[in-house]
Amino acid sequence: MTTFPSATQELRVARRGQITLPKALRDNYRIHEGDALTLVDLGGVFVLSPRRSEIDRMADEVAEELAAKGESLASMLDAVREARAIYEVDREDPPGAGEQDGT
């Protein structure tokens, strides 16, 4: 049976911003030297995960789908910016806004 260390542990930041994960955590989650971890900043609350984030996986899937269609993330962002600019213009000057009601 796997035992889990205390949910809250204090870590110290060493030179160059390094931290050391307690051995019990490394052992329980099979984290080894050189393993990649995912760090998420939730407004000052840090979540460190020994597995790849779902967001990273989804971003890779989107990039692959874009590449298969001959698109890139940059071209997709350009299209979004163009659509946003058109939306902003339409919102500021909706159709019929300059017409007066004949009643």
Image (cartoon, helix red, strand yellow):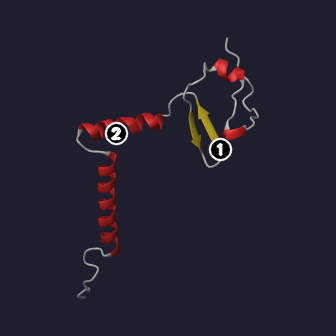
Whole-percent x, y for residue 69 in the image: 23, 40
Which quarter of the picture shows residue 102?
bottom left
Q: Quadrant of the N terminus?
A: top right
Which quarter of the picture shows residue 59?
top left
Query: What residue is shown with label 1?
Result: 45
Residue at left offset 30%, top offset 70%: 90
Which quarter of the picture shows residue 29?
top right
Amino acid type at image mark 1: Val
Which residue is at the far front?
15
Whole-percent x, y for residue 48 in the image: 61, 34
Which residue is at the far bottom?
103
Q: Earlier in the sequence, mark 2 or mark 1?
A: 1
Query: What residue is shown with label 2?
Result: 63
Whole-percent x, y for residue 5 in the image: 73, 23
Marks 2 and 1 sit apart, C-alpha to C-alpha, by 29 Å
Q: Residues within 10 Å of mark 1 (few under 14, many from 20)?
A: few
Q: Quadrant of the C terminus?
A: bottom left
Whole-percent x, y for residue 18 in the image: 67, 36
Q: Secondary structure at mark 1?
A: loop
Amino acid type at image mark 2: Ala
Instruction: Identify which residue, 29 or 3, lies in the foreground.
Output: 29
Residue at left offset 56%, top offset 25%: 35
Q: Is residue 17 above or below residue 5?
A: below
Q: Is residue 11 above or below residue 41?
A: above
The disc label shown at residue 90, or none = none
Which residue is at the far top?
1
Q: Nearer the viewer, mark 2 or mark 1?
A: 2
Residue at left offset 56%, top offset 31%: 37
